[in-house]
Amino acid sequence: MISAESVEESGEEPCIRLDPLKITQLPSGDSRAAFTESGSKVTANGVHDIEDRILRITGYYGYNPGYSSHRREDGSESHGDTAGSETSGENRFYQTCANAVLKVLGGLLVVLCVSSSWMGTTQLVKLTFQSFSCPFFISWFSSNWNILFFPIYYSVHVMTTQEKQTPIQKFRECSKLFGEDGMTLKLFVKRTAPFSILWTLTNYLYLLALKKLTATDVSALYCCHKAFVFLLSWIVLKDRFMGVRIVAAIMAITGIVMMAYADGFHGDSFVGVALAVGSASTSALYKVLFKMFLGSANLGEVAHFLSTMGFFNLILISFVSLILYFTKVEHWGSLSSLPWGYLCGLAGLWLVFNILVHVGVVLTYPILISIGTLLSVPGNAAVDVLKHEVIFSVVRLAATCIICLGFLLLLLPEEWDSVTLRFLATIADKKTEEHGEELTESSVHTRSRSRANGTVSIPLA
């Protein structure tokens, strides 16, 4: 047994001496357990004093002074972990798992909504063109719905917070995006006009491209805007240079050339590719300028800005639509003959997509928005094959795959190389530790067999 006689409170290291075990005779009428003659001292709480000292010196994990795993004087056993701590640990584990599951499901829902709204918008444009072929009017009508951004934001804000502000007060608070003095006529035109023009050009060129190409080709070419955003951010915003993103931009350009070459560099195919690339370019320029001037804006300021841009589109861009009408470039006919069902459905889906893009970037991961946009390509391809019976050539399929692959490369984070190297180093360290444990176990078995034979064998490492 372990003796406590030689353990004193001195500057020397404690020494533990093993004495022969001498058992005394137990009295028949005593209900307590007898102790050995070596006489380990018992503290007030009934725990062996020497055991507490040993556990304190060795730093035993989970050790609480006075509570050991051995029996106390009354014969009961003590445990460091109580039932309450185990229950709280299980609750924290279940809560962490539930939060992770909800986060994954929320991300999948965002991806599904983004891809469905963008795919539905593209397909509904193709259906609208069958009875109403006025792309600028469609673009102008859909952009007017941006006025609803701020009312929707304010409604959600009132329902989710206890702060009571009138719409005018909230509008003035969010108008600080234009300056400390709020929105003036000069700032309204100066800040809103460039973005409204780029917005209109992006939508108009996209609709014109859908008149020349299939929905799959246009949606795939539009994904090149991610490469253009990187190039403009690298040049204008001085973002970090990444070799993999340069490779992705080259792949996007290669896909564009292959798409144009699919039917020869002539005819509607080449014009459609040029229009789709133009739409991707203006979209990239819009996003870079938005990041440059409004990158630090909060959700309310973004909703205010988009509603203001919709108001600008309704007041000033209307003149362009009227000019096209009177010059017979786009003839609408009577208002009753317009396909209002298609137009309102198209504008609603476009509004939902824009809300998800601008709000989703603030509330969730931006990569989910990008993945949702990319997934619209195979969705449109499925609709084109099953409903419109489109047959894709090998060159077009290869170009689409190259563009999509380049888009995925652009989604890699800036620190992806260092993260990958650390991950590989961690895997290598784990394999080295497992190999070392296997060598240790094999050496132990070898020594045990050698001792059984009366010899000692030392394995060579």
Image: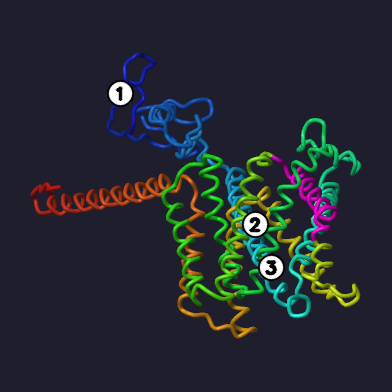
Rendered image quadrant of residue 300: top right
**Dot 2 or dot 1, earlier in sequence:** 1
User: Furthest residue to the top?
Assistant: 11
Q: Which residues are magenta?
A: 297-320
| Quadrant (top left, top right, bottom left, bottom right) of the N terminus | top left
**Dot 3 or dot 1, earlier in sequence:** 1
Q: Is residue 141 left or right of residue 23?
A: right
Which mark, by number, is residue 394? none
**Dot 2 or dot 3, earlier in sequence:** 2
Q: Identify the residue at image location x=68%, y=55%.
A: 357
The answer to if 315 sits in the magenta stretch is yes
Q: Is there CB contact under 8 Å for labels 3 and 1?
A: no
Q: Position of residue 16 (x, y in %)?
A: 31, 26
Rendered image quadrant of residue 211: bottom right
Task: Look at label 3 and name its amino acid.
Answer: Leu
Query: Badge 3 local density, few (<14 within 10 Å), some, or many (20+)?
Result: many
- The residue under label 2 is 102
Colouring scheme, one of rainbow, by chain, secondary structure, one colour: rainbow
Q: Nearer the viewer, mark 2 or mark 1?
A: 2
Q: Is there CB contact under 8 Å for labels 2 and 1?
A: no
Q: Is residue 367 left or right of residue 426?
A: right
Q: Secondary structure at mark 2?
A: helix
Q: Is residue 401 left or right of residue 15?
A: right
Query: Badge 1 local density, few (<14 within 10 Å), some, or many (20+)?
Result: few
Q: Secondary structure at mark 1?
A: loop
Q: Main secondary structure of the magenta part?
A: helix
Q: Identify the residue at image location x=61%, y=84%.
A: 386
Task: Look at label 1 and name its amino acid.
Answer: Cys
- The residue under label 1 is 15
- The residue under label 3 is 207
Alpha-carbon span between mark 3 and mark 1: 88 Å
